[in-house]
Image (cartoon, rainbow, N blue to C red):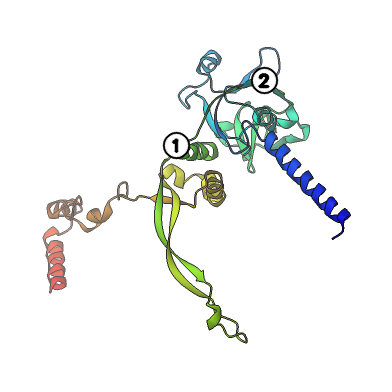
């Protein structure tokens, strides 16, 4: 290699090192993938703007927001995963714990511009009878909308987001960082599904098959070596989730469980997620006892006789046939 080529290579190496140092220097403060606790209030940008969302209990009380459906407290979330408006995330990333700020988000980047084409006339038959009044929130052909007017057999429905066309002002303060892995997992499922689930993290010893490299001395150069495996024990960092009926019936979970669990394992550095469903037999109707009679909770012989008498049936004859069949089965 010539001296000139060596000098060029050395210069390129220096440039790469400098770029890496610059990038590392820029990666200070809060970054995408960090879990934080955020206090915020989002309002429409107008005089006496309407509160869109808040974590502040005093703001919620002043605005008359429903305090039964949720607790107003700092929200735990992960940065960089789309749980905040992009402009707000950009303002937070690179900052420090305790930082606060106000970000104005234009309508197009918030809930979209108002589109006149999304206000359409539909047959009133597509709207449930109980929702046939102005202001009702309805589902029509899979779209969420709000009834504006009803005339004859037609209804005018606005399918725009209720906040379409509104600029949003977002006040925030980063009040804490979430370091506990289990709390991070809980916050993710709260963000994805709005559920507080029973879960825990543990390390499992599991057996797996592993490819074994054949000994070179045993390999014939003219033959393709057959793959060999051996069973080894490996550790798996596992998030266990106890499924409840609400989770099992959640449409988003049913359709996206694979993607959700993949994101959870990636963000938390886990190996796998195991969802456990516990069936204890409760709430299953009569059960075997009820069907068989006299076997724990079902009707006994006296109950059967009374029921048959009420139906004007020869109870003694029926009972003799049942007892005879039982004796033959035991033989």
Q: In the figure, is residue 327 to the left or right of 25?
A: left
The disc at residue 282 is: none
Which residue is rendered at x = 80% and y = 50% of the image?
Answer: 10
Which residue is rendered at x = 53% and y = 18% of the image?
Answer: 60
Residue nearest the viewer, comparing 13 with 228? 13
Q: What element carries label 1?
A: loop
Residue 22 pos. (x, y %): 73, 37
Residue 113 pos. (x, y %): 75, 30
First in residue order: circle 1 vs circle 2? 2
Q: Is residue 198 above or below residue 38?
A: below
The disc at residue 102 is: 2
Q: Distance between the residues labelled 1 and 2?
A: 30 Å
Residue 89 pos. (x, y %): 66, 31
Q: Which of marks 1 and 2 is in front?
A: 2
Q: In the figure, is residue 272 to the left or right of 279?
A: right
Q: In the figure, is residue 243 to the left or right of 58?
A: left
Where residue 160 sits, quadrant-wise, is top right
Quarter placement of the C terminus: bottom left
Q: What element carries label 2?
A: strand
For mark 1, what is the residue?
A: 196
Q: In this view, does 31 lie above or below 106?
A: below
Give the total of numbered labels. 2
Residue 42 in view in this figure: no
Which residue is rendered at x = 15% and y = 67% of the image?
Answer: 326
Q: How crowded is mark 1: few (under 14 residues within 10 Å), some or many (20 or more)?
A: few
């Amino acid at each position: 290699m010539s001296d000139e080529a060596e000098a060029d290579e050395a210069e390129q190496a220096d440039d790469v090192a400098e770029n890496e140092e610059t990038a590392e220097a820029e990666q200070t403060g809060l970054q995408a993938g960090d879990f934080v606790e955020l206090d915020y209030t989002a309002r429409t940008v107008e005089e006496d703007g309407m509160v869109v969302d808040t974590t502040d209990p005093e703001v919620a009380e002043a605005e008359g927001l429903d305090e039964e459906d949720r607790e107003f407290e700092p929200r735990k979330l992960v940065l960089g995963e789309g749980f905040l408006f992009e402009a707000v995330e950009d303002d937070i990333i690179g900052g420090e714990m305790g930082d606060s700020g106000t970000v104005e988000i234009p309508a197009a980047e918030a809930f979209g511009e108002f589109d006149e084409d999304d206000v359409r006339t539909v047959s009133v038959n597509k709207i449930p009878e109980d929702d046939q009044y102005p202001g009702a929130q309805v589902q029509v052909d899979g779209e969420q909308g709000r009834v504006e007017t009803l005339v004859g057999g037609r209804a005018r429905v606005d399918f725009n987001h209720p906040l379409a066309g509104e600029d949003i002002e977002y006040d925030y303060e980063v009040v804490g960082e979430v370091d506990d892995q289990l709390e991070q997992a809980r916050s993710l499922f709260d963000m994805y599904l709005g559920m507080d689930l029973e879960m825990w993290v543990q390390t499992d010893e599991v057996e797996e098959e592993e490819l074994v490299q054949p000994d070179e001395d045993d390999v014939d150069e003219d033959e393709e070596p057959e793959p060999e495996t051996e069973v080894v024990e490996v550790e798996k960092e596992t998030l266990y989730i106890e499924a409840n009926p609400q989770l099992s019936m959640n449409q988003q979970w049913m359709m996206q469980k694979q993607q959700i669990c993949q994101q959870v394992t990636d963000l938390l550095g886990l190996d796998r997620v195991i969802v456990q469903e516990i069936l204890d037999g409760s709430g299953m109707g009569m059960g075997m006892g009820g069907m068989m009679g006299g076997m724990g909770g079902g009707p006994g012989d006296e109950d059967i006789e009374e029921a048959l008498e009420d139906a004007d049936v020869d109870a003694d004859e029926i009972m003799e046939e049942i007892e005879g069949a039982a004796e033959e089965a035991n033989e």
